[in-house]
Image (cartoon, grey):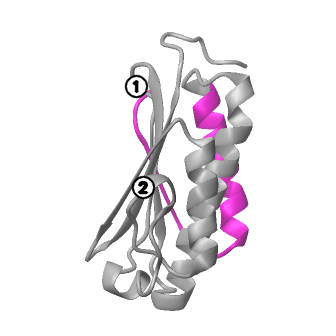
Amino acid sequence: MGPVELTFSALPAHVRTARLIVTAVARRSGVAEALLDEVRLAVGEACSRAVEAHQRHCPDEPVRLELSGTGRRFEVTVSDTVPSEDAGRGLPAAPDGLEYALGDGTAELGLAVISGLADDVEISSTPKGVQIRMSWPAEEGVPPQS
């Protein structure tokens, strides 16, 4: 399945819609049914963190999702546009050796949850914002379910 890009307003109500879309794309990309709850929860945590950061720092900017289901991996990237110097003041070390620059302790807990749910997690922080990339195994050549 080719890449899918989605942007949404930084409103908590849109997180549920993002979770539903990501779950549908994951299913069509060959992610096992047993993993779909993990995909849904991890993406919900990442989107909620981005929405919260945007509401504090840049409420008019959209949150961005990129979905890719190529090869044997399904990958989701959640991006915000909160500059890292604003987002990461005073955080302790990230869980499991992950590096990040995010808001408060709830963001820290959310990242711990994400790292436990996703097969592979990469968090990067730049002056333009934070990206959380997550991926799960997918079966190649799985026909879409009707």
Taking the spot 66% from the left edge, 36% from the top edge, the residue there is: 24
Secondary structure at numbered mark 1: loop
Tell me, yes or no, whether the highlighted magenta stretch contains residue 14. Answer: yes
| Sequence-first disc among 2 and 1 | 1
Q: Position of residue 4 (x, y in %)?
A: 45, 42
| Quadrant including the N terminus | top left
SS at badge 2: helix
The answer to whether residue 63 of the structure is visible from this angle is yes
Q: Which mark is residue 70?
A: 1
Q: Quadrant of residue 27?
A: top right
Q: Residue at x 44, y 69 (%)?
A: 93
* x, y percent for residue 127: 25, 77
Q: Are marks 2 and 1 in contact (CB under 8 Å)?
A: no
Q: Residue at x 69, y 34 (%)?
A: 36
**Numbered badge on residue 97:** 2
Q: Which residues are magenta?
A: 1-27
- Residue 85 lies, with reference to residue 76, above or below; the image says below
Q: Nearer the viewer, residue 96 or 43?
A: 96
Residue at the (52%, 86%) spot, across then down: 59
